[in-house]
Image: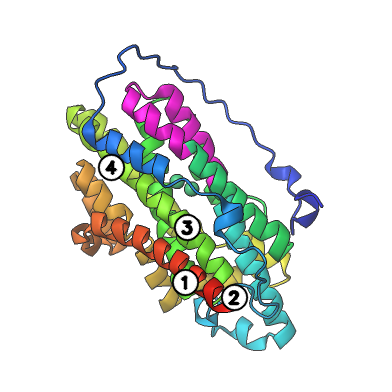
Amino acid sequence: MTTERRYALPVGQTDWTVNSRADVSFRWEYDDGRESLLRLYEKGKQQQWDATDRIDWSQDLDPENPMELPDQAISIYGSPVWNRLTDAEKRNLRRHLQAWQISQFLHGEQGALICTAKIVEQVPNFDAKYYAATQVMDEARHVECFSRLLHEKFDLAYPISPPLKTLLGNVLSDSRWDFLYLGMQVLVEGLALAAFQRIRDMAKNSLAASVNAYVMQDEARHVAFGRIALRDYYPQLTEAERAEREEFTVEACYLMRDRFVAEELWEAIGLPKDECVAYAAESQFMKQYRTRLFSRIVPTLRDVGLWGPKLRAAFEDMGVMDFANVDAAALLEQDARVATEFDARRASAAGAAE
Ligand SMILES: [Fe+2]
Ligand SMILES: [Fe+2]
């Protein structure tokens, strides 16, 4: 059955093409690669994987609570609306909310696929073209994983959420190559890593947890790619050029913090939208969650030298400055390690079954 028939809302209204004319950059010097990027390229080649083999797709989701996430993670948990719901309505909400989230991952991954293909075209150096090419394959695999989860397991999908569409549109419509890295590799992927991590670490359903763990293993390399490329490039820019990047970043960060509230979901399942959005905005759990979304973004920005007064003031205002001291490289290493632990668990479960 087509995706179109699984969408909970009409998808036609989000038909989308972006005018993104940009210069395509050819390079005739093939032998001046940076060691750090070439090493990452080797890693990218060695760590390719096949979603069909590595993930056990025979597992099912739970009909009561597909990914087996705690209800406390639902943004309206404990609200008067939540307390009025029957068990059947709660079941319906869990399924829709989780499908909404995975749908945003899916559409975001398509955005990443397109952005990375553009990086191959636009980036001037060959070491970066090499690496970006491995990432194109990674992103196609991520689209495949989330798409399978929605089609085969949830049997439900949501169109792209308007704030995600705005964010991707802003990234794709800028013709400068570094905006692809900044917008996609640092901001969108940094945000996604924090969101994937919540499912990887909280979901009791092993299919859902393993999909997110394996995607994160790749994403950790992608964030590292953005860090290496921008760390070399941003110090070369003028003050005014860096200020422009900071402005773009501040705007994107507020958008990510304030507008990812699933507005369209509440209406689709017949709940009072304004009440749900207002409750989620004030909920202590959600405030913490929105803060944690920046745990990967803040240290990376500091690391690449995008750390002017305007950006710092915005992060102070958002209460996320503590993340500046997080060891981002250690977190990325941990993401890679956790994925191998999932492999080991599956291997030992297969061994026990024999
Ligand atoms: Fe991805
Ligand atoms: Fe990625």
Give the residues in magenta: 109-135
| Distance CA(mark 3)–CA(mark 1) | 13 Å
242 vs 165, left or right, is left
Amino acid type for the residue under numbered disc 1: Arg
Q: Say if 41 sits above or below 56 in the image.
A: above
What colour scheme governs how the chains and residues are painted in the rendered image of this protein?
rainbow
| Distance CA(mark 2)–CA(mark 3) | 25 Å
User: Which is more N-terminal, label 1 or label 2?
Assistant: 1
Q: In the rendered image, which residue does mark 2 sit on?
A: 354
Q: In the rendered image, which residue does mark 4 sit on?
A: 227
175 vs 147, left or right, is left
Amino acid type for the residue under numbered disc 3: Tyr
| Picture quadrant where residue 339 is located | bottom left
Q: Could you say which is closer to the camera, residue 324 or residue 134?
A: 134
Please tell me whether the stretch drawn in magenta is mainly helix, strand or loop. Answer: helix
| Picture quadrant where residue 25 is located | top left
87 vs 199, left or right, is right
Q: In the rendered image, which residue does mark 1 sit on?
A: 345
The residue positioned farthest toward the top in the image shown: 28
Label 4 or label 1, whichever lies nearer to me, is 1
Q: In the rendered image, which residue does mark 3 sit on?
A: 214
